[in-house]
Amino acid sequence: MSIFTKIINGEIPSYKVAENDKFYAFLDINPNAKGHTLVVPKKEVNKLFDLDVETYNELMSFSRKIAIAIEKVIPCKRIGMSVIGLEVPHVHVHLIPLQAMEDIQFVKKVKLNSEEFETISKAISSNL
Ligand code: AMP
């Protein structure tokens, strides 16, 4: 079972942004930028392009809604999207508010306390 399945099942805490029957969105715990969000299909599949096409399309559509909400609450030039998966073998879309190219590079990290995570997740969630 992946760490993200444990998060979806509520066995590990997360700062939830949104959920429906197929997807779960929550804040990345080691964010590149404030508002860095992960969108995960509840179905545990390792690689993005191994998803069935319906789930893939729905993942993109769900991620789009989240990205639009993030952009409303986090000052940024735009929301970047990236899929990596080298650390956690369970498909997840990174949605990252960008000010500069380095924000998408997983090099510079932002430290946030639990209060800040809580405030950001609620703000995005209420702008969906
Ligand atoms: P990658 O698999 O390379 O796309 O990276 C996995 C991402 O998941 C990283 O950005 C981590 O910071 C994030 N991550 C790992 N564990 C957790 C967790 N428990 N809660 C939130 N984000 C996590």
Image (cartoon, rainbow, N blue to C red):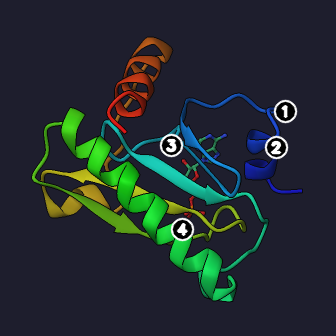
In the image, is 15 to the left or to the right of 108? Answer: right
Q: Are marks 1 and 2 in contact (CB under 8 Å)?
A: yes
Q: Residue at x 13, y 45 (%)?
A: 76
The one of 18 and 50 positioned closer to us in this rendering: 18
Residue at x 64% of width, y 75% of height: 55
* 4 lies above or below 16: below
Marked residue nearer the N-terminal end (2 or 4): 2
Q: Label 1: state its secondary structure.
A: loop
* Quadrant (top left/top right/bottom left/bottom right) for the N terminus: bottom right
Q: Position of residue 119 (x, y in %)?
A: 39, 18
**Pointer 4 residue:** 59
Q: Which of 63 and 104 is in front in this view?
A: 63
Q: Between tags 3 and 1, which lies in front? A: 1
* Helix, strand or loop for disc 3: loop
- Circle 2 sits in a helix, a strand or a loop, which is it? helix
Which residue sits at x=35%, y=47%? 32
Distance of mark 3 from mark 2, alpha carbons? 15 Å
**CB under 8 Å between discs 4 and 3:** no
What kind of residue is marked 3? Asp
How far apart are the alpha carbons under marks 4 and 3? 17 Å
- Residue 11's tag is 1
